[in-house]
Amino acid sequence: MEDEEKVLEWLVQQVESDEIEDVTDEMLDMLITKLPNLAVLFCNKIKHKCSSAILLGKDATCFLFSDDNNDKRSQKVLNELENIDDECDQHGIVFVKMDNEEEAREYGIEKVPALLYFENEIPTVYE
């Protein structure tokens, strides 16, 4: 139990940082049960750099948001996500991202990107 609490403390520190933290399905399950408010961005992860993707996180992993090759649009999406993250921080909502489509389907999400909000473990999908 003590190790779980340490992991949770570390996770909360990570997700409250300025970047949107990438989580695994196990981490997500723990956050859902331990946090009263949680926002999850489900998106597609791709392994190469391309003009139709935006970068999220220090590891420079691309996350595909559309088939559009418009870099201005991608930058606008990134800016809006950063704004959402900042607003979530102000309201005590932890904001994370996940690229696990199987996990997304468990919550009824068929198409990504999608935003899922948990309040007291109850999910709501925003489209």
Image (cartoon, rainbow, N blue to C red):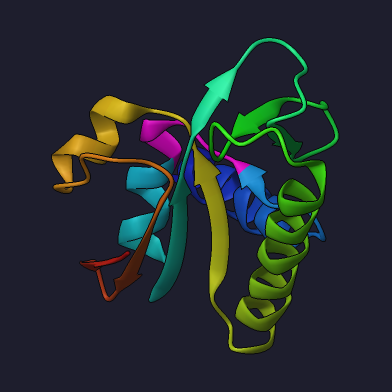
Residue 114 x %, y %: 38, 52
Which residue corresponds to the image point at 62% horizontal and 58% vertical from the top-left? 12
Q: Is residue 94 left or right of residue 50?
A: left
Q: Nearer the viewer, residue 104 or 112?
A: 112
Q: Quadrant of residue 1?
A: top left
Image position of 123 with respect to 104: above or below: below
Residue nearer the viewer, 23 or 61: 61
Magenta part of the chain: 22-27
- Find residue 100 and report its image quarter: top left
Is 46 located above or below residue 103 in the figure? above
Look at 38% across and 48% down and name the residue there.
Answer: 30
24 within the magenta span? yes
Q: Position of residue 2 (x, y in %)?
A: 50, 45
Q: Nearer the viewer, residue 116 or 94?
A: 116
* Residue at image location 42% in from the left, 54% down from the top: 31
Where residue 36 appears, as percent x and y from the top left, is 38, 76
The residue lying furthest to the top in this view is 47
Q: Quadrant of the C terminus?
A: bottom left
